[in-house]
Amino acid sequence: MFAQTKQPQLQLVIVTGLPGTGKSTFAEYAGRLLLCPVFSKDWLEASLWRSGIGREANSGWAAYDLLTTLAENQLRLKQSAILGRKLSWEEAESVGARYEPWQDDRLVLDTIHPLEGNLDALHSYLL
């Protein structure tokens, strides 16, 4: 029988943004901070490519499905997870427009600010 220990607050961190904005660095830092796995759409899709499942077989959509499955199972197990994915500029604008009405507790960071400042803000928010 496993001993019951105090559970840390369950976290789902979603890191999105345009290519080259530091998403992976940020996600990996968050993973070390929370001691939880990081799942990246790009990593999953690259694995599919190595297995012979290419873009012609919708590897991108399959990677999103895998990302969702991994996140759902982590949360079902009462474990935190970090998810990473790229956005096109159009997607970023569309998603950004949906953030304003949200009133629940969340942290929104912008990569226009230096990475170190964003990492400090993440650290303060999560711990």
Image: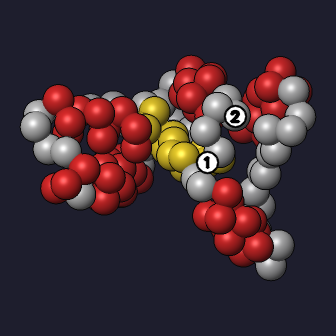
Number of marks in the rendered image: 2
Measured in 3D between alpha carbons, the distance from the residue under mark 2 to the one under mark 1, in whole angstroms, is 9 Å
Q: Which residue of the protein is positioned furthest toward the bottom in this rendering?
A: 101
- In this view, the residue farthest toward the front is 56
Q: Does residue 6 appear anywhere in the picture?
A: yes
Location of the C terminus (image quadrant): top right
Residue at x 61%, y 64% (from the top left corner): 91
Mark nearer the N terminus (2 vs 1): 1
Dot 1 crowding, Cα within 10 Å, few <14, some 14–19, many 20+: some
> Which is in the foreground here, disc 2 or disc 1?
2
Q: Position of residue 125 (x, y in %)?
A: 79, 40
- Given residues 84 and 88, the one toward you in this image is 88
Does the image show residue 120?
Answer: no
* Identity, as a three-letter code, of the amino acid under mark 2: Thr
Between residues 78 and 40, which one lies in front from this camera angle?
A: 40
Kind of residue at badge 1: Thr
The picture quadrant where one finds residue 99 is: bottom right
Q: Residue at x 23, y 57 (%)?
A: 58
Disc ID at residue 16:
1
Q: Residue at x 31, y 59 (%)?
A: 61
Residue 21: mark: 2
